[in-house]
Image: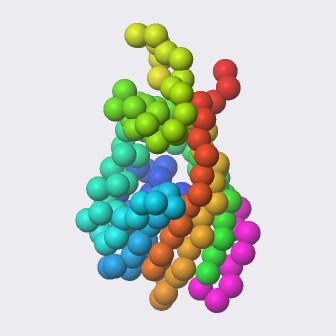
Amino acid sequence: MQGYKAAWEQRDPGMFAALFQADGRYHNTPFQVQRGAAELIEYWKRVQLQEDVHVTYEVLADRDGIGLAHWHVTYQVASEELFQIWAKSTGTNLVSRQPGDPLPRMVLDGILQASLVDGLCAEARIWWHSQPQAK
């Protein structure tokens, strides 16, 4: 989780991919999976559209190479592109914005389950919810 936090706060796709085995898998939703360094890096590039990222976490369980953690992230949406990615992923109506309105600060809250082998992640699954931060 320390590496996950560092990769997210530093917005570094290579650092993120380095947490995984060569064929490591990251399930960012129950229906999507990124496998191997190239896919992990490509997916993680979206964090470069975030600014002022703050990650906190609590490890809930760590036993026999399986870990479970609760994580919480806040960040400033730094591009209209990222806002549209988020809006499409929510499956709900868009945040009401007028042209020229500032982009929102987002709050994400989730759970991460990871399987580790020799200190590297073989498979990680996350479940999360996001919403604009209350003003």
**Left or right of residue 15, residue 107 in this image:** right
Number of on-image labels: 0
Residue 43 can be seen in this image: yes
> Which image quarter holds the C terminus?
top right
Q: Position of residue 34 (x, y in %)?
A: 36, 65
**Left or right of residue 81, residue 31 in this image:** right
- Label the magenta part by its dominant secondary structure: strand
Residue at 66% x, 71% y is 68
**Left or right of residue 61, residue 77 in this image:** left
Q: Position of residue 126 (x, y in %)?
A: 56, 61
Residue at 59% x, 41% y is 130
Residue at 44% x, 67% y is 26
**Left or right of residue 14, residue 91 in this image:** right
Residue at 40% x, 64% y is 33
Magenta-span inclusion, residue 106: no
Residue 104 can be seen in this image: no
Q: Position of residue 115 (x, y in %)?
A: 54, 79
Does 91 appear above or below 135?
below
Region rendered in magenta:
58-65
> Which image quarter holds the N terminus?
bottom right
Q: Position of residue 41 (x, y in %)?
A: 31, 60
Magenta-span inclusion, residue 61: yes
Nearest the camera: 127 or 117? 127
Does 126 appear above or below 46?
below
